[in-house]
Image: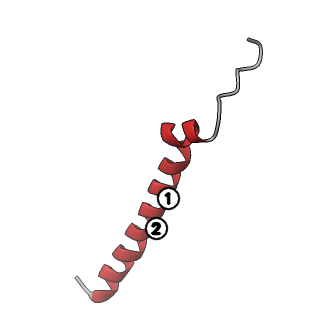
Amino acid sequence: MTPATWSAFGVWSAGGLVVYFGYGRRRSELARSRSGPEQPAQGE
């Protein structure tokens, strides 16, 4: 493959990893447990 192809692959892979880990950090159980006590659901 050409260097331009590898470069594009690297850029898209890096972007994908940022999205993947960013989403995982925000939605993880550990992040929820560190944010404080859970709020009870409305109607309970």
Q: Nearer the viewer, residue 2 or 38?
A: 38
Q: On residue 15, which mark appears?
A: 2
Type of amino acid under label 1:
Val
Quadrant of the rendering where the C terminus is positioned: top right
Residue at the top extreme, as displayed: 44
Which of the 4 image quadrants contains residue 38?
top right
Task: Tell me if 40 is positioned left or right of 8 in this view.
Answer: right
Colour scheme shown: secondary structure
Quadrant of the rendering where the N terminus is positioned: bottom left
Type of amino acid under label 2:
Gly
SS at mark 2? Answer: helix
Q: Residues within 10 Å of mark 2 (few under 14, many from 20)?
A: few
Q: Is residue 32 above or below residue 19?
A: above
According to the image, label 1 marks what residue?
Answer: 19
Q: Is residue 41 above or below residue 24?
A: above
Instruction: Estimate the x, y position of residue 25 in percent, counting from the top left.
Output: 50, 50
Q: Is residue 17 above or below residue 41?
A: below
Task: Tell me if 9 is positioned left or right of 34 in this view.
Answer: left
